[in-house]
Image (tube, rainbow, N blue to C red):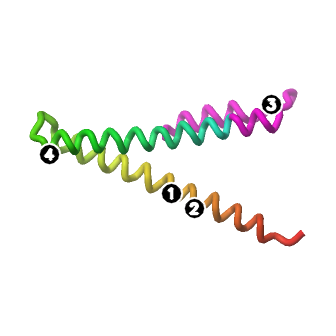
Amino acid sequence: MNPLSVQALATKITPSENMRVKPAEVQESFSNMLKSAINEVNNAQVKSDILTEKLANGENVQLHDVMIASQKASIMLETTLQVRNKVVEAYQSIMNMQI
């Protein structure tokens, strides 16, 4: 995920002092951000798979391009998993709070 897109989204969903934002709008923005992030990870995985297949078939593709795409996809997936783990951990902490 592009850090600039996260920053742009944060400024988009952060209410200014004189503006009220409805919870549904924030939820929709957050949902759209998650969907786009997952789509970016998926696109990186697909690109890596395509380049790997082209290399295996002997097509004109550079090895370093394949390796870079593979590492990018791997890092993006690992980051996504770590974010998911933190969200699940936060949810479990909230659910275990005593009221």
Relative depth, front residue between 61 and 9 = 61
60 vs 77: above or below: above
CA neighbours of label 4 inside 10 A, class few (<14), some (14 to 19), many (20+): few
Asked if the residues shown at circle 3 and circle 1 are in contact, with their CB atoms under 8 angstroms apart, the answer is no
The residue under label 1 is 81
Q: Nearer the viewer, mark 3 or mark 2?
A: 2
Q: Residue furthest left?
A: 58
Instruction: Determine whether, in the image, residue 76 is placed left or right of residue 3.
Output: left
**Mark with earlier residue (3, 1):** 3
Asked if the residues shown at circle 3 and circle 4 are in contact, with their CB atoms under 8 angstroms apart, the answer is no
Which residue range is magenta in the image?
1-28
Q: Residue at left 83%, top 34%?
A: 22
Q: Residue at left 52%, top 41%?
A: 37
Q: Nearer the viewer, mark 4 or mark 2?
A: 4
The local secondary structure at tag 2 comes to helix
Where residue 67 appears, as percent x and y from the top left, is 24, 47
**Amino acid type, callout 4:** Ala
Q: Nearer the viewer, mark 1 or mark 4?
A: 4
> If the image is split into quadrants, where does the C terminus sit?
bottom right
The local secondary structure at tag 4 comes to helix
The residue under label 2 is 85
Marks 1 and 4 sit apart, C-alpha to C-alpha, by 28 Å
The residue under label 4 is 56
